[in-house]
Amino acid sequence: LISPLILSSVSQSALSFANRSPSVERVIHFASYLILVSQFLRILSASRDKCITYFVFIRPMSNTMSKGDDEEAALAGEIETSVSFHQRSVVDGDSNIVSNDGGDAEDTFANDEKKKEETPSSKPNDSDGDGDEDEPLFQFMTGIKEDLNARAPLYKDDWGKPRSVFTVVNATVFAFIIQLIPALIFAELMARETENNLAVAEVVLSSAVIGIIYAIFAGQPLVIMGITGPVAILLGTSYRLTQTFDAEYFPFFFWVCIWAGAMHIVSSMVGLVNLVWKVTPFTSQIFELFIGISFIYLSCRDLIEPLYLGQSDVDPTDRAGQYATLLLGILTCYISYTLHFAETWTLFTRQIRTVLTAYNTLFAVVIVTGLSYLPGVDMGTLDRVVVLAPWDWQPTADRPWVTNPIQGMTASAIFGAIIPGLMFFLLFIIDHNVSSILSQVPKYNLKKPAAYHWDFFVLGITFIPCAILGLPPGNGLIPQAPLHVRALCTRKIETDKYGVKREVVTYVEEQRWSGLGQALLMFVALAAFRVISWIPRGALFGLLLYLGIGALHGNEIWERSIFCLMIPKKRPPVPVVTDVKWRTVQFFTLIQLFCAFAVFAVANFTSVGYLYPLLLVILVPIRSYILSRIFSEEDLKRLDPHGKEEEKEDNYHEEQRIIHQHQRNDSVDSETMEFPHFGEFRGQGHTQLHHRTTSALTEDKVGGDGENNDASTKNV
């Protein structure tokens, strides 16, 4: 209860210093009291069975009975063994780490794992993901101490010689490329929304600085850092706050980063990072859909708006350049999306197809950039990435690198910066930790333990150089961080229990060199601004459109929405279709769609768009306290599964396999294909006609022999 009360009092103090409009004042009060009420509801829910007896009647007796019941249940095998928070991504079994100093790291890690097994753990691994309600949420320095005790003995091994130097070098270059291209996209968005105060130079330099800090000091260095799309949206929507407080941008931005960094540090020290385990697929799916539709909207806006549709007093040459930008954007999106599925082609070798898929965005940018220089495409009005080439190592805006935190700032502006700082904290506590979790899922068979609390502490430290230098803050990247881990894997092909051939990870290069190397390569990108200046802006917005479409691919909300448009017999037989009433599925999907589009509307079309991370966090108590009363527990197990990562991943991959197989087989209605003219239109008429003709001839041949007619027909 203390944290929302402090937030409320700080908000009151900020309002006392500021002359704010009543609407903004109500928003601040509403946010403060909403957090207060949500915490209060959580406490009531956690103590609903023991509240009266615990505080009034039989506190000692309840403790004794609870302890005895737990022991009996444990002996009977009814209580699942708990695992600590930083052990969630550690695979069970023997763990061996190759050490250069005679195996000290191996012995240390083995002893550490033995201690973990003997020590009662703090974070249960319940199938429903709710955890132990009696466990205190706030544990000062407990999580950080556990993380440091687990990772500190392995720090020297992290800098040891990798088993395969080629794998590490390849992963370094791969991580650099897949981070640089999206960074240029988000830099264009920020440059538009912040009036070029934050542009390409600041984004690339920020990726380098925070990447180096994280690679050296973080507990889990496999997570790569960078600027994400949600950060670009948040920085753009919060830019207007400087006008509200009548403050200069970079001093105001300095205090935003300071407040956000302080919240990260304090929350990691008190164990608030544990809240990420309360996030279920209900929230993560809405977040993913929100990002997808936001990217699609922003890309279409920046590609179509400059066409000056409906205006007749526009220079035809200028309009031609904008149409060229639009066509180049569509072509970039098409090439990227086509190469995204190159691994499923039958052309070329497997190695070539893998390269085409991994570097699809790079190939698309190179091809479109080359086409943009063809005669007749660029008539002198084609927009390209605006950078100073060669870069003079100065900020984009006319300012010094070191920010003066009190220049043009009042007390109201300093305290008012808490609001966007809190939004950064709410965004990163979900976005960064989800990226970290996805990078350490059991399928990667990582041998070294996670360090979520300490990593979040280091993430808070990265806000300090961002505040001083005026750089946009970043966090763990999705999907770049998991892809970076995958690039470090040694894999083999095995057939799973569903009869599907899949890659199985046998070894991962768990080291710090690749994360540090890709961050250092960002300085190479800063020195190569002349090459970056060749890229047409349409290519970047086309890539943003591709990222938006890619975010929809595999999103469960989007898939269920498509199922709603299909006739019942054509829906794939996945559990959500076969085991849940379809009206229930439609209602649940409608709720998610409403939430996703509500967050999208607030973020892009309101003056308080910077509050969208708060709306995402509010989805967590909505799922826990409202939807659990509307839908049955059995339905929620299918609609919002939140169990062990291994089970969730197997179920997810199996459902995706069924869906994709169904899409391949039923992309055309088989009943419609019985008509030759439809089949011919799809290029399949000859095959259908040949099949029917062959069948008829076979039946006639078999029918000619009266004695063997039945047996032959059976064989046919």
Image (cartoon, helix red, strand yellow):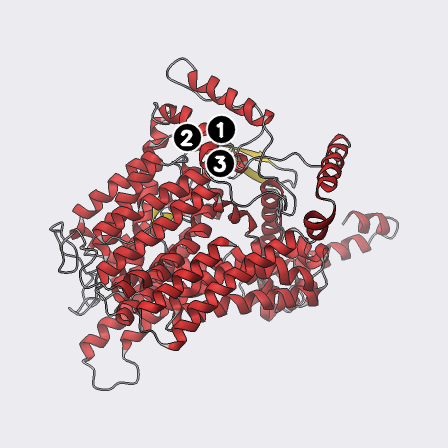
Q: Residue 547 lies in what quarter of the image?
A: bottom left
Q: Which badge, 1 or 3, is on the more N-terminal residue?
A: 3
Residue pictured at 17% horizontal, 51% vertical: 402
User: How far from the left and from the top, in percent, is residue 397?
Assistant: 16, 60
Q: CA distance from mark 1 to mark 2?
A: 8 Å
Q: Secondary structure at mark 3?
A: helix
Q: At label 2, which amino acid type do we have?
A: Glu
Q: Residue 499 lies in what quarter of the image?
A: top right
Q: Toward the viewer: 245 or 353?
A: 245
Q: Which badge, 1 or 2, is on the more N-terminal residue?
A: 1
Q: Report if the CB atoms under discs 1 and 2 are less than 8 Å apart.
A: yes
Q: Which mark is residue 510?
A: 2
Q: Is residue 253 visible?
A: yes
Residue pictured at 45% horizontal, 40% vertical: 453
Q: CA distance from mark 1 to mark 3?
A: 22 Å
Number of marks drawn: 3
Q: Report if the CB atoms under discs 2 and 3 are less than 8 Å apart.
A: no
Residue pictured at 40% horizontal, 27% vertical: 152
Q: CA distance from mark 2 to mark 3?
A: 25 Å
Q: Which residue is mark 1?
A: 447
Q: Which residue is mark 3?
A: 142
Q: Secondary structure at mark 1?
A: loop
Q: Nearer the viewer, mark 2 or mark 3?
A: 3
